[in-house]
């Protein structure tokens, strides 16, 4: 390996690592607030990329149909819970009207818009916004259907549910998008030559978007009331409830932020590599390795670990391309061993 090859691999590793950093931060965010190891996060990566690809190919994205189905199921569950609530605690008519607007009318409006427009004729920002409008609302809906009823269950139960949701969404992804992979048009086609190294504009976009989102998350958690409420819920769920913070709303908001991050990762990485219906799972696992390095609690350590994963993957592809995935996931073994020695037992907080 000479210096030019090292520079090229480093560029690829940083670009991939930026995506893994975002995924790791999303996993830490969801786990710290809801105690859910959000394995289905990878499906949001794939769904976001393939929905964007469908628009650019001039096809109707079938993920819009899934959005309507999830919305109807969420409204049915919300209506069931509302009607069973004790009299005087909630206004049924007002609550049902708000749920109908949120879970039925808005998804149907997005479906009609996606069905009625020619995606290929839309400018790229409009395609991006429409893809986000389709995929992002699925996060809170999935939380409402699968995780909210079990919010006080042990972590192991939530993990089993997360695996089940992942398998269901993986099968749905195959039905909706098929087994063929897709790529999207780069956001920036410019190419820069720095000495002997060629830097693509899309790599610059990926890194810049990751940095901007990390900065936006920091401002959100540090400067906004809802962000501080999420931080309080992550520190102590019981204490957050005692001071009037709704942990249910915090869980939905955490899943919303995670689905935004996952969808963004999908549309960022799709111009660089071909995305299949199951590609997001492997990306999510690499983000999970970074999250484990951070102990599923520390955002800076998780970000650093995810960046390390991206660089290790890039260098491994040069020396042992057939074993690069094995090398990356082997990184988790010494981390878990070290944590088991330093923290031999962690008592789960009581609900």
Image (cartoon, rainbow, N blue to C red):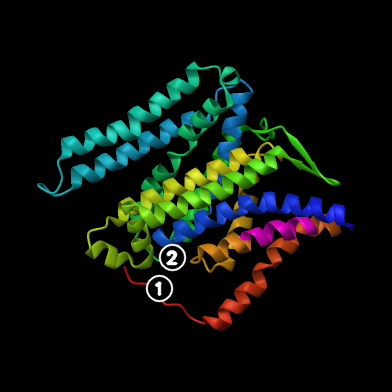
* Place of residue 192 in the rendered image (x, y in percent of width and height, measured from the top left): 77, 39
The residue positioned 69% from the left and 53% from the top of the image is 14
Q: Which residue is mark 1?
A: 348
The one nearer the camera, 303 or 171, is 303
Q: Which residues are magenta?
A: 306-315
The residue positioned 63% from the left and 73% from the top of the image is 335
The residue positioned 18% from the left and 48% from the top of the image is 85
* Place of residue 284 in the rendered image (x, y in percent of width and height, measured from the top left): 59, 52
Q: Main secondary structure of the magenta part?
A: helix
Q: Are marks 2 and 1 in contact (CB under 8 Å)?
A: yes
* Place of residue 331 in the rendered image (x, y in percent of width and height, measured from the top left): 69, 67
For the question of whether residue 152 can be seen, the reply is no
Q: Which residue is mark 2?
A: 155
The one nearer the camera, 166 or 260, is 260
Q: Earlier in the sequence, mark 2 or mark 1?
A: 2
For label 1, the SS is loop
- Can you say whether 15 is above or below 102 in the image? below
Residue 33 is a magenta residue: no
* Place of residue 34 in the rendered image (x, y in percent of width and height, measured from the top left): 40, 59
The one nearer the camera, 173 or 244, is 244
- In whole angstroms, how far apart are the C-alphas of marks 2 and 1? 8 Å
Please give left or right for residue 239 compared with residue 220 in the image.
left
Quarter holding the N terminus is bottom right
The residue positioned 80% from the left and 53% from the top of the image is 7
For the question of whether residue 69 can be seen, the reply is yes
Residue 108 occupies which quadrant of the picture?
top left
For label 2, the SS is helix
Q: Residue furthest right?
A: 2
Q: Residues within 10 Å of mark 2 (few under 14, many from 20)?
A: some
């Amino acid at each position: 390996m000479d210096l030019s090859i090292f520079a090229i691999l480093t560029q690829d590793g940083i670009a991939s690592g930026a995506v893994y950093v975002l995924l790791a931060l999303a996993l830490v965010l969801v786990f710290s607030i809801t105690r859910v190891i959000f394995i289905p996060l990878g499906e949001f990566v794939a769904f976001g990329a393939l929905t964007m690809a469908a628009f650019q190919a001039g096809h109707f994205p079938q993920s819009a149909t899934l959005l309507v189905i999830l919305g109807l199921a969420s409204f049915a569950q919300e209506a069931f819970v509302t009607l069973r609530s004790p009299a005087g605690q909630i206004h049924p008519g007002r609550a049902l009207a708000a749920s109908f607007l949120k879970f039925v009318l808005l998804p149907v409006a997005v479906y009609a818009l996606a069905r009625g427009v020619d995606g290929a004729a839309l400018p790229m920002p409009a395609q991006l916004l429409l893809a986000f409008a389709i995929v992002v609302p699925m996060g809170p809906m999935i939380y409402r259907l699968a995780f909210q009823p079990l919010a006080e269950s042990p972590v192991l139960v939530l993990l089993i549910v997360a695996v089940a949701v992942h398998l269901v969404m993986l099968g749905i992804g195959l039905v909706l998008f098929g087994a063929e992979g897709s790529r999207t048009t780069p956001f920036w086609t410019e190419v820069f030559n720095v000495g002997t190294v060629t830097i693509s504009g899309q790599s610059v976009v990926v890194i810049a978007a990751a940095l901007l989102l990390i900065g936006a998350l920091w401002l959100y958690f540090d400067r906004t009331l809802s962000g501080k409420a999420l931080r309080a819920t992550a520190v102590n769920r019981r204490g957050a409830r005692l001071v009037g913070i709704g942990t249910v709303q915090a869980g939905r908001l955490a899943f919303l932020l995670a689905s935004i991050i996952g969808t963004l990762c999908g549309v960022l990485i799709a111009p660089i590599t071909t995305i299949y219906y199951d590609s997001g799972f492997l990306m999510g696992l690499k983000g999970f390795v970074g999250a484990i390095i951070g102990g599923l609690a520390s955002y800076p350590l998780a970000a650093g670990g995810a960046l390390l994963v991206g660089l290790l993957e890039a260098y491994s592809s040069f020396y042992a391309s057939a074993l690069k995935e094995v090398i990356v996931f082997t990184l988790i073994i010494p981390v878990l061993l070290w944590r088991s020695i330093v923290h031999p037992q962690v008592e789960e907080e009581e609900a």
